Amino acid sequence: MTVVAYPDFNIILNIYTLALGFTVGGFCASSFALVTGQPLKFEMPREQSNLSVLIGTMFRLIAGPFMIIRNTLRAVMIAGREPYWVMMAIVISALWSFCQGVLIVEAVCQLSACS
């Protein structure tokens, strides 16, 4: 008799949470670029109203992991960065995406969408 090992549910949930956080960040960065016509950057433009600074900060917080990976890929293609910088950017982006995904899953569960 063969024993089939199924992946642990927690591993699948962690991967889903990581992907959800990164996807929401990418969606936020893409929607910002669609509305403004410029890619989202970490640099804040000068002389803005308080509301636009608040909205810009929220967009940058949510889209941060996507921007890190986008900037890392550009740096690899253009400048040929060393592998340890690329690995560090991937780890930072993954941790940020995971934490963001956890917040999203918890918020959805608090809204009684989880059974």
Image (cartoon, helix red, strand yellow):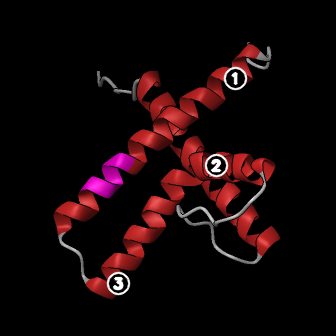
Give amino acid for label 2: Thr
Residue 17 vs 61, above or below: the answer is above
Q: Which residue is mark 3?
A: 77
Q: How many other residues sit within 10 Å of disc 2, few (<14), some (14-19) or many (≥20)?
A: some
Q: Nearer the viewer, residue 40 or 78?
A: 40
The percent coordinates of residue 52 (x first, y second) are 77, 54
Q: Helix, strand or loop at disc 2?
A: helix
Question: In percent of the image, x 29 and y 25: which residue is there?
Answer: 2
- Report the span colored magenta: 88-92
Label 1 crowd (10 A; few <14 / some 14-19 / many >=20): few
Residue displayed at 31% across by 23% down: 3
Earlier-in-chain disc, 1 versus 2: 2
Say which label, 2 or 3, has the lower sequence index.
Answer: 2
Q: Nearer the viewer, mark 1 or mark 2?
A: 2
Asked whether 89 falls inside the magenta stretch, the response is yes
**Which residue is under mark 1?**
107
Residue type, numbered disc 1: Ala
Locate residue 104 relative to residue 17 in the image: left or right.
right
Q: Identify which residue, 43 or 46, lies in the foreground.
A: 46
Task: Give the SS element for disc 1.
Answer: helix
Residue 30 as seen in the image, left or right of residue 65: right
Residue that mark 2 sits on: 57
Q: CA distance from mark 1 to mark 2?
A: 20 Å
Q: CA–CA distance between discs 2 and 3? A: 28 Å
Q: Position of residue 95 (x, y in %)?
A: 40, 40
Quick one: 71 or 112, which is closer to the camera? 71
Name the main secondary structure of what is drawn in magenta: helix
Residue farthest along the front direction in this orientation: 47
